[in-house]
């Protein structure tokens, strides 16, 4: 698994000896070691700087292509969601419900150039508009 996440030379290092991005890749390797059919990733790159985050996005796509595991990736970044996904599921505010699903038809493999293509921007706009529509839905009063 360390080879899969390109950390095979760091097998004898402690977590505190690794960068934040390397620690995230170790977490991915640990999760994949069980050969899951489904991998849930909840904001895994949220605390990373933008350059590390973009590199790990590309690495995650490579790992996904190698393992064929289904990945549910939770993020607040619209661009990240569009770049990584085949489908973006937009959630409404309270109560949290699926308000729409946006199909992502960007070709694979995706690279840094993908983020500059007109279709990428069209899809980012579609997801952003879906978020605004979902947030305008009436919110039911919560009862105790």
Image (cartoon, helix red, strand yellow):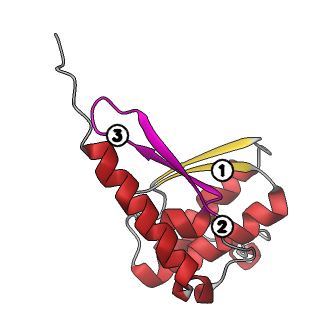
Give me the C-alpha separation between circle 2 and circle 1: 10 Å
Badge 1, how many Cα within 10 Å: few under 14, some, many 20+? some
Q: Which residue is mark 1?
A: 71
Which callout, 3 or 2, points at the residue further toward the start of the chain? Answer: 2
- Image location (x, y in percent) of residue 64: 74, 61
Badge 2, how many Cα within 10 Å: few under 14, some, many 20+? some
- Image location (x, y in percent) of residue 31: 67, 49
Nearer to me, 86 or 8: 86
Q: Which residue is mark 2?
A: 60
Question: Which stretch appears magenta?
Answer: 85-104
Q: Residue at x 80, y 45 (%)?
A: 35
Badge 3, how many Cα within 10 Å: few under 14, some, many 20+? many
Q: Is residue 51 magenta?
A: no
Q: Is residue 97 magenta?
A: yes
Q: Which residue is mark 3?
A: 92
Q: Quadrant of the N terminus?
A: bottom right
């Amino acid at each position: 698994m360390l080879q899969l996440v390109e950390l095979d030379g760091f097998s004898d290092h402690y977590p505190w000896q690794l960068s934040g991005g390397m620690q995230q890749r170790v977490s991915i390797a640990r999760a994949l070691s069980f050969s899951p059919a489904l991998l849930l990733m909840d904001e895994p790159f949220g605390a990373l700087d933008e350059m590390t985050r973009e590199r790990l996005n590309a690495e995650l796509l490579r790992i996904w292509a190698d393992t064929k595991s289904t990945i549910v990736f939770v993020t607040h970044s619209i661009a990240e969601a569009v770049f990584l996904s085949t489908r973006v599921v937009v959630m409404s505010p309270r109560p949290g419900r699926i308000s729409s699903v946006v199909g992502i038809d960007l070709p694979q493999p995706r690279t840094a150039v993908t983020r500059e293509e007109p279709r990428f921007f069209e899809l980012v706009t579609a997801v952003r508009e879906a978020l605004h529509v979902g947030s305008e839905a009436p919110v039911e009063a919560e009862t105790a």
